[in-house]
Image (cartoon, grey):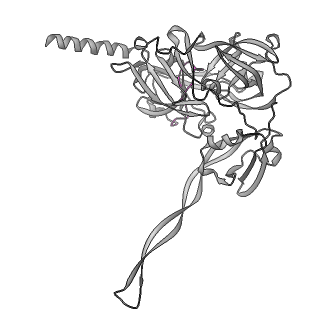
């Protein structure tokens, strides 16, 4: 009996010691857990519990400390404590954003727990990814999660598997291509090759699962990293420090280990938007979600490596937005919907004992709240721009179907179709309904 008590005490002490450290540990005997995620616009959205509050985070290899924003507009909701004010700077041309650094927070992702996690809370209403993804997004998490665990990302089946390093089987992925990682400021970098303007160029790229594009390259004439003539200027995204614009183009090929992608999308962000991130002079850009999703990945930060294996997205086309429209979730609107009710009546004849039941289908109408999708960005001289659409227009109908039948991502996907496809749109502009149509246009040869 005493021996049993001692063993239990030792087990409890060992687990308590692990959880007391500033690191994630997968609880349970096997040291493994599977967590399902949503793949939205090539981004991984996972459930995260912070101090007992359930939230949704983007799993972003491009950040070090967890950042939380616009969650409940209340420090008390998450019981954020031990905070100090700091300023964070990211992509974009705006000024650094104000944040609170907080310590001793309890993070739980599946069965992976850290009882002493730092986080940065940003209270800036402009910094909100939810309208552009169509679902609530409360924050982003990266290095602090990856550094403590082996993280398998199964894009094809949309789940991640987290494993305590001591429980990981190194030989489990025999068909994987293993590539070494380099780290700078707690961010992972990968050396790959691109073929651009007829030249093979070795590049060092940040692995950025928090980016939805395929590839970003920083223009550098000395390194032959530049776009010559086959490009168009476009909105690229939003960063911590503002909106990012740049040139969109194609590269002849991208080689990630033994895997080669031809005619892949590439973007060249404006120099002013990336001044802050170019402090690491060896960095030439980012490898982002539209290429990463073509693999199932195993991140092994302990051994500074990442393992690649083809996913079901491997052969997907590299399409791009041929309309010029960017949409966002813009609150709610009242929509009239049909509601069919079944009512039973009795038809009475002259004989009181002879009555026939009759089923009467009656259509009622009801008002329901549905998401409103408005145009947030509109590329100049694009098909939608030339047709007469404007920023702020609320989309009501697309290709003869009401938008409430679709998610935000399903609507956006219609703008990535083949050149020449007809898009018909009905919009609400300041209370007036208008109809437009245009054809998708290819800008890259």
The image quarter in which residue 30 lies: top left
**Is residue 70 one of those drawn in magenta?**
yes
Can residue 17 be seen? yes
Give the residue displayed 74% in from the left and 39% down from the top. Answer: 418
The picture places residue 296, in percent across and down from the top left corner, at 55, 23
Residue at 86% in and 25% down? 229
- Image quadrant in which you'd find residue 338: bottom right
Secondary structure mostly seen in magenta is: loop
Which region shows up in magenta? 57-72
Taking depth in this image into account, of 7 and 96 the one nearest to the observer is 7
User: 112 above or below 185?
Assistant: below
Q: Quadrant of the N terminus?
A: top left
Seen at 76% across and 41% down, the residue is: 323
Left or right relative to 195: residue 189: left
Of 185 and 175, nearer the camera is 175
Is 41 on the left-hand or right-hand side of 441? left
Total number of numbered discs in the rendering:
0
Is 346 left, or right, of 16 in this rendering?
Answer: right
Relative height, residue 233 to residue 280 (above, below): below
Q: Quadrant of the C terminus?
A: top right
Q: Residue at x 60, y 37 (%)?
A: 133
- Hey, which residue is sitting farthest left in the picture? 1
Residue 230: x and y, percent? 83, 27
């Amino acid at each position: 009996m005493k021996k049993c008590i001692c063993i239990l005490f030792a087990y409890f002490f060992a687990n308590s010691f692990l959880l007391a450290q500033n690191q994630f540990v997968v609880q349970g005997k096997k040291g493994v857990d599977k967590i399902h995620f949503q793949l939205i616009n090539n981004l991984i959205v996972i459930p995260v519990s912070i101090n007992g509050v359930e939230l949704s985070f983007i799993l972003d290899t491009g950040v070090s400390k967890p950042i939380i924003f616009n969650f409940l507009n209340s420090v008390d909701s998450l019981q954020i404590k031990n905070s100090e004010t700091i300023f964070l700077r990211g992509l974009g041309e705006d000024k650094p954003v104000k944040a609170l650094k907080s310590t001793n927070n309890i993070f739980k992702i599946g069965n992976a727990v850290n009882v002493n996690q730092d986080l940065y809370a940003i209270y800036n209403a402009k910094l909100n990814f939810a309208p552009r993804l169509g679902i609530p997004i409360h924050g982003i998490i990266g290095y602090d999660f990856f550094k403590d665990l082996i993280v398998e990302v199964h894009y094809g089946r949309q789940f991640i598997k987290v494993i305590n390093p001591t429980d990981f089987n190194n030989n489990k992925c025999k068909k994987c291509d293993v590539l070494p990682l380099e780290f700078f400021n707690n961010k992972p970098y990968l050396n790959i090759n691109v073929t651009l303007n007829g030249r093979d160029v070795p590049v060092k790229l940040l692995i950025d699962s928090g980016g939805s594009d395929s590839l970003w390259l920083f223009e550098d004439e000395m390194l032959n990293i530049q776009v010559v003539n086959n490009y168009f200027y476009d909105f690229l995204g939003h960063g911590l420090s503002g909106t990012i614009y740049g040139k969109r183009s194609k590269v002849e090929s991208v080689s990630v280990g033994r895997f080669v992608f031809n005619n892949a999308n590439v973007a060249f962000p404006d120099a002013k938007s990336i001044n802050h991130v170019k402090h690491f002079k060896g960095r030439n850009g980012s490898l982002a979600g539209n290429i990463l999703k073509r693999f199932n990945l195993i991140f092994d930060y302990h051994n500074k490596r990442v393992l690649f294996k083809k996913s079901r997205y491997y052969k997907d086309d590299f399409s791009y937005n041929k309309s010029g429209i960017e949409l966002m979730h813009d609150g709610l609107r009242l929509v009239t919907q049909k509601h069919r009710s079944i009512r039973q009546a009795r038809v009475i004849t002259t004989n009181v004992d002879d009555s026939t039941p009759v089923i009467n289908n009656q259509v009622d109408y009801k008002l329901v709240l549905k998401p409103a999708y408005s145009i947030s960005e509109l590329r100049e001289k694009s098909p939608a721009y030339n047709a007469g659409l404007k920023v702020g227009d609320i989309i009501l109908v697309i290709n003869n179907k009401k938008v409430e039948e679709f998610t935000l991502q399903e609507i956006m996907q219609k703008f990535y179709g083949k050149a020449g496809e007809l898009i018909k749109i009905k919009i609400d502009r300041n209370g007036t309904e208008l109809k437009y149509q245009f054809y998708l246009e290819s800008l890259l040869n």
